[in-house]
Amino acid sequence: MSTGNSQHLSDQVREAAAWVAGRARSVRIEEGRIEAYAATLQPPTHRPDPETELTDGDREARTAFVICLDAINFGSGWWPTIRKRPGRSGYFTVAAGLTDRFRAAGPWTAAELGQLDAAAIALVLDQDPTHPLMADFAAALRDVGAHVEDDHDGSFVAVLDSAAGSAPTLADLLAGWRAFADVSIYEEREVPFFKRAQIAAADIARAGLAELRDLDRLTAFADNLVPHVLRVDGVLRLDPALTARIEAGELLVHGSPEEVELRAAAVHSIELLTAARAAAGQPLIPAEIDAALWTRGRGGRYKAVPRPRSRNTAY
């Protein structure tokens, strides 16, 4: 359970998401469905996949893997345009490429990350080096290398140790890196999401790389798949014009009101689902509900319906 009273970025995300959800014009939470829907959620189970996760190696290598993967855990708007591995989604294609590289050659050092370019990361991921994502991935990994080198003496484990066992503190630290930037503007107010900074903290804990407290203080990890699942399942109701645009395959502009509303409504919905589970005596924390919905979204029912897509470096 949570300890301490200091405010972390996750608390700011939670507050801002509720604020946006209360003002949203294109996305509405069907609060009358929350209690029944919460009861359908199953606690997530995780079975490590050695093809897409570095399950071997020492703590330094495995920590480097998680931080590097989450630094480039974006690009969902581009997934239809990349070369995918057989049977793998865009995310798992990237994860598998990174896993192969770490297993074959070991982790990049912080100094090596600082020299990465688009061609180098494209070779690792078996992609066209001119694809826009490759330059974005390389820039993110160079930023990671610079912070690990300059702030943590080149040690990825030192990044974890500096968080002193706190998941929100680790997310706060990563959120200060350009590689993990994720703040939008809505009605002239900054709306932080920090999807990847928060999920990195959760992934570190899930991989057993650090015992992190206060995981329940992290929010959901606002992307495009979780709001899609909530829409298909009737928890989110979209303006018909927005639904039509999404189902026609139109890309949403990152930072546009409707795109911010989708992400914020998903985060706030999961807060409501968390409260409903707690009231029923079957608690799940937001990260667990997020994982359950993300896994659900890999099913055929959800893949059959076009999901919202936006090309950005947030998710």
Image (spheres, helix red, strand yellow):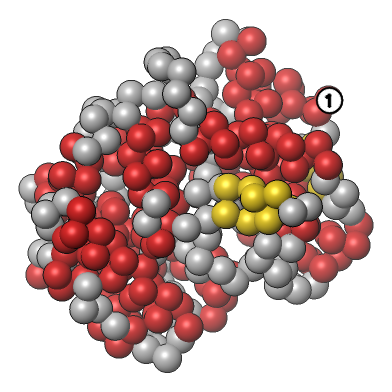
Which residue is located at x 45 percent, y 23 percent? Answer: 6
Quadrant of res 154? bottom left
Quadrant of res 184? bottom right
Which residue is located at x 22 percent, y 45 percent? Answer: 159
Please give left or right for residue 303 compared with residue 74 in the image. right
Question: Residue flagged by tag 1: what amino acid is it?
Answer: Gly
Count neighbours of disc 1 (C-alpha within 10 A) and say few if under 14, some if 14 to 19, many if 20 or more: few
Could you tell me if residue 153 is visible in this image?
yes
Could you tell me if residue 51 is visible in this image?
no
Expressed as whole percent of the image width and height from the top left, the position of residue 295 reads: 51, 45
Expressed as whole percent of the image width and height from the top left, the position of residue 93 reads: 38, 68
Which residue is located at x 74 percent, y 63 percent? Answer: 256
Q: Mark 1 falls on what kind of element?
A: helix
For the residue pair 22 and 105, the one nearer the viewer reads as 22
List the residue tagged with mark 1.
32
Which residue is located at x 15 percent, y 45 percent? Answer: 157
Expressed as whole percent of the image width and height from the top left, the position of residue 121 reads: 29, 78
Please give left or right for residue 55 compared with residue 73 in the image. left
Please give left or right for residue 314 compared with residue 214 in the image. right
Quadrant of res 1? top left
